[in-house]
Amino acid sequence: MDAEKSSSSSFEDLSNLNEQERAELASSVLEPTQTKAPEAGQHSTAEQEPKVESEANASEEKETDSECMDILGNGTLLKKVLKKGRSELRPESKDLVTISYTGRLEDGTVVEEQSNAVVQIDDVEVVQGLDMALKLMNEGEVAEVIVNPRFAYGELGLKDPTDLDPVIRSVPPNATITYTVTLVSMREESDIEARTYTSRKEIGNKKRLRGNFWMKRQEYNLAIQSYRRALEYLDDTVSAGGMMESGAGSVELSTTELQDLLEDRMKVYNNLALAQLKISAHEAALKSVDHVLKCQPNNAKALFRKGKILDAKGDTAGAITLLQKAATIDVDDKLIQSELSKLILKSKREARNERDLYQKMLGQAQKLEQKTKTAPAVQNNESSKIMMWGYLVGTILIGVVGVAIFRYNNS
């Protein structure tokens, strides 16, 4: 971790000290050989100690009396230093930090409290606003962090406190939470490959459960983030030969351990596929669910998820085939049966609409053909009528001319 300076608001401002205060500050750091003996009428050094301690406390109060830092620049996440840290070190992404914190509503009600909790930076193992603020704290610092609902428990709030162990009371919807948090200690994340089988399995499942928590809250992007981190601990734990690296060298895992790891990975991939489907990342969801089906071709949940993905991509027939297979594997799953029925009805409706469309197109084609055939016949009838009238008129004209000529000759 690189040492970083704390925000300028947390440094002591010495520019406004008067001469007397500067002299007192200078005298407090003099070497013992430079200290003057007390003159007559003056109190001894021991008698002055309470005064020096009082001045130190006043100086500490000045140091911690900082303004709120607007972390995001829009007032939704504010941080104020209550007590400066013991160093300028700040945690970075993936670092493990030990924190103690208390979250209160605007009326002072405590809704969240945890002591010496170990969380990983950027893994949203606490509410998102607090996770972001931790990266701006120095080791040993105590701060007040005001988190807007958007980066806390949002519009849903937290109806069931059992969903999150540190929460001791329900959180109402759209609640702003003020956290008082202490960054007790911090350390870098150790190499995953160097961890024991038990440690990696425990951490991987912890992150999987955190992903499930975000899924229930419909925070799908945060769920995906947690699931991917879980896979980092669970996916590559075992080599192709069933060996795991440890501090003592390669250790062969038992059949039971290998099966447990496989089951854990399949749970993560199945849930990851669902989260990706929820945000319409269909190709990514297909890759995730195929990881499951490659290892477990008869995994009913994976078949069901893949069917849903294919349906979302417009392949209703392919989706029905997968759901039918899933239904035969898990005959008691009502959700699979329900979705299969919906897809069959959808398929029939699509087939009927397609047939109606073809019939409509065929009818229009027949009408056009009939119109094309009748058009010449109509034209021929009209021509015949014109010719008949022409002959009749011509005959009448010839008769009239003949009578006229006869009368002219006899006159």
Image (cartoon, rainbow, N blue to C red):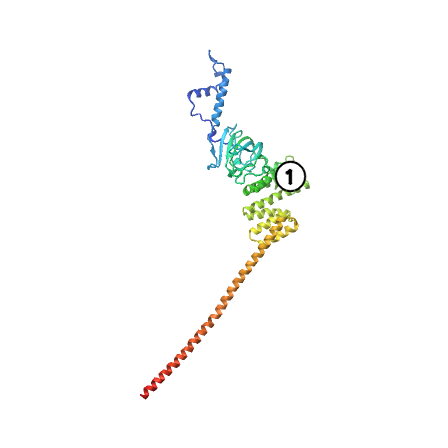
Residue 149 image position (x, y, % from top left): 51, 38
Place residue 172 in its image quadrant. top right
Please state the total of marks drawn on the protein image.
1
Residue 266 image position (x, y, % from top left): 62, 44
Q: Secondary structure at mark 1?
A: strand
Look at 47% across and 72% down and name the residue there: 377
Residue nearer the viewer, 68 or 3: 68
Kindly give the residue lying farthest to the front in the view shown: 107
Residue 146 visible in the current orientation: yes
Kindly give the residue lying farthest to the bottom in the view shown: 410
Q: Is residue 222 above or below residue 41?
A: below
Q: Is residue 352 above or below residue 50?
A: below
In the image, 351: left or right of 9? right
Look at 32% across and 87% down and name the residue there: 409
Residue 57 image position (x, y, % from top left): 49, 23
Residue nearer the viewer, 362 or 234: 362
Place residue 379 in its image quadrant. bottom left
Q: Residues within 10 Å of mark 1 (few under 14, many from 20)?
A: many
Three-letter code, disc 1: Met
Residue 136 visible in the current orientation: no
Q: Which residue is mark 1?
A: 244
Residue nearer the viewer, 267 or 340: 340
Kindly give the residue lying farthest to the top in the view shown: 40
* Quarter of the C terminus within the rendering: bottom left
